[in-house]
Image: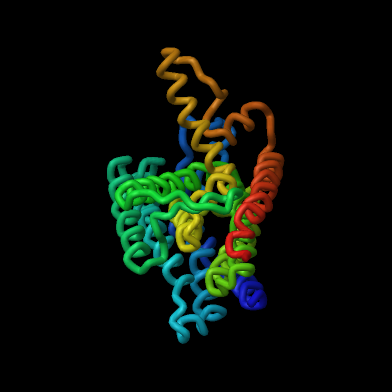
């Protein structure tokens, strides 16, 4: 029912704001300030010391929302919203370890790349196995727009699924580089999931999607430029986990191609930059990667970046909705 999604959204928004009013001053007292990358835009250095790990705000907001608006689901044995939340929360824990290491070292270096990759792969493998054993996903890969399926061998599908999970989580994390950007981009994604859950009768996935949207709106009150707090890897890895978990819980991972178009563009810009740099022995394809930094170097303000990237995400969210909306129609 749509009202559960709306109630979940409102609860998450209000709790996130309430937690933020308490958490941000606490983070300041703890001197939990962000260390800014020295190889980023020079004007970002003014953000040095802004409290980080603010993702805790919307994680708490979402938790409260699904435990209240989604409580009836637990009584009925419907736990989809809980499964998505727990998976995203495990990725948030990896992000928290990374943030904690950065704060301890007082520099923008947390866990090593190998440590993060290993942890992310282990979590992805466990999640995909869990979904497959419960029959939530199948190796019949749904093709959006064409309303058909591609049957894959189990092993191929498993490798593909793990790759998608890890890739999606890191792509969302990479998008978090400008005030409010990843929140703005992800809100239309959450709304799209909520709309799909509604037409498919997946009430409690809608509850989670609504909570995700509401929590991010609440977080934006503090994170919109100029940001009073950053979500840190704690928040961005949670978002990455939530975005890909929803796709797999609905057994349609390929929807992430149109729905996550901004995340993909950000990741591809990084890949292209590195490959071009190596191939040309030092030349750069973009002024700076990932993509949002390139546009910053072209003179775009953080307001413009937020508006344009969010608008693009919203347009593709609408396209994604129509790409799968006819899946269960006779």
Q: Which residue is pictured at 55% across the width and 30% down the height? A: 42
Q: Quadrant of the C terminus?
A: bottom right
Q: Residue furthest front?
A: 330
Q: Which residue is pictured at 65% across the width and 43% down the height? A: 309
Point out residue 247 in the picture as x, y percentages from the top left corner.
50, 57
Q: Quadrant of the N terminus?
A: bottom right
Say whether residue 103 is visible. no
Q: Compared to 298, does 199 lie above or below?
A: below
Quarter location, residue 303: top right
Point out residue 255 in the picture as x, y percentages from the top left corner.
54, 51
Point out residue 59 in the picture as x, y percentages from the top left corner.
49, 65
Point out residue 86 in the picture as x, y percentages from the top left corner.
40, 67
Q: Which residue is pictured at 54% across the width and 43% down the height? A: 263
Q: Is residue 80 left or right of residue 229?
A: left
Q: How is the image coloured?
A: rainbow
Q: Is residue 309 left or right of residue 39?
A: right
């Amino acid at each position: 029912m749509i009202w559960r999604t709306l109630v979940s959204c409102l609860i998450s928004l209000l709790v996130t704001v309430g937690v933020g009013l308490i958490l941000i001053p606490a983070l300041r007292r703890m001197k939990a300030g962000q260390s800014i990358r020295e190889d980023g835009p020079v004007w970002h250095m003014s953000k040095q010391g802004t409290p980080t790990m603010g993702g805790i705000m919307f994680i708490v907001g979402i938790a409260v929302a699904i435990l209240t608006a989604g409580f009836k689901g637990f009584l009925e044995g419907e736990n989809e919203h809980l499964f998505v939340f727990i998976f995203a929360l495990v990725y948030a824990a990896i992000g928290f370890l990374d943030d904690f290491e950065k704060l301890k070292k007082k520099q923008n270096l947390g866990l090593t790349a190998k440590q993060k990759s290993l942890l992310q792969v282990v979590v992805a493998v466990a999640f995909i196995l869990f979904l497959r054993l419960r029959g939530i996903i199948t190796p019949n890969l749904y093709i959006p727009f064409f309303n058909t399926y591609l049957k894959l061998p189990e092993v191929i599908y498993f490798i593909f699924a793990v790759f998608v999970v890890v890739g999606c989580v890191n792509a969302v994390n990479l998008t978090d580089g400008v005030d409010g950007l990843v929140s703005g981009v992800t809100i239309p994604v959450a709304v799209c999931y909520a709309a799909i859950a509604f037409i498919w009768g997946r009430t409690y996935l809608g509850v989670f999607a609504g909570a995700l949207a509401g929590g991010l709106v609440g977080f934006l009150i503090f994170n919109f430029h100029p940001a009073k707090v950053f979500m840190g890897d704690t928040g961005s890895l949670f978002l990455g986990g939530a975005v890909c978990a929803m796709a797999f819980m609905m057994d349609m991972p390929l929807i992430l191609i149109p729905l996550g178009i901004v995340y993909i563009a950000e990741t591809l810009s990084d890949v292209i930059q590195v490959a071009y740099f190596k191939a040309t022995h030092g030349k750069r394809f973009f002024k700076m990667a990932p993509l949002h930094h390139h546009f910053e170097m072209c003179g775009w303000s953080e307001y413009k970046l937020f508006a344009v990237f969010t608008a693009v995400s919203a347009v593709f969210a609408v396209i994604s909705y129509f790409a799968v909306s006819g899946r269960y129609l006779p």
